[in-house]
Amino acid sequence: MPDVGYSYEPHEPFGEGLTTRRPWNTGALTMVELINGRVAMLGFAAALIGELVSGQGPAGQVMAMVRWYLSL
């Protein structure tokens, strides 16, 4: 038996949720943004280490990997 007290939110026009104030779960978003920032820092550090090791920038490393992959 469905819960009678539950009701769906009304449909909203496209983009309206981005411009109106809504009660988002900011606690969950805080943790997601924290993890996202840490992963971005790891990726940036990996790009710097790769540049120090190979002597090529990130784009050069990608092109070298593509050339290596296509030569197999």
Image (tube, rainbow, N blue to C red):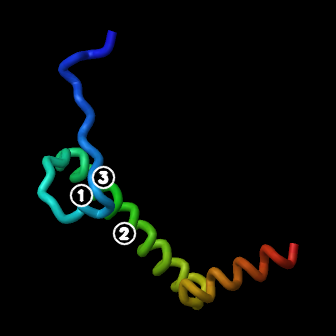
Q: Residue 18: image x %, image y %?
A: 23, 63
Q: How many marks?
A: 3
Contact flag, marks 3 and 2 (Cβ < 8 Å) = no
Q: Which residue is mark 1?
A: 17
Q: Which residue is mark 2?
A: 41
Point out the frontmost of discs 2 and 1. 1
Quarter containing the C terminus: bottom right
Point out the frontmost of discs 1 and 3. 1
Q: Nearer the viewer, residue 9 or 34?
A: 9
Q: Quadrant of residue 9?
A: top left
Q: Who's the residue at 73% across and 79% down the image?
A: 66
| In-image side of 10 versus 64 (left or right) | left
Q: Which residue is mark 3?
A: 32
- Classed neighbour count for the residue bearing mark 3: other residues with Cα under 10 Å, few (<14), some (14–19), many (≥20): few
Q: Residue 11: image x %, image y %?
A: 29, 47
Asked if 30 appears above or below 62 in the picture, the reply is above
Quarter containing the N terminus: top left
Q: Quadrant of residue 68?
A: bottom right
Q: Who's the residue at 79% across and 74% down the image?
A: 69
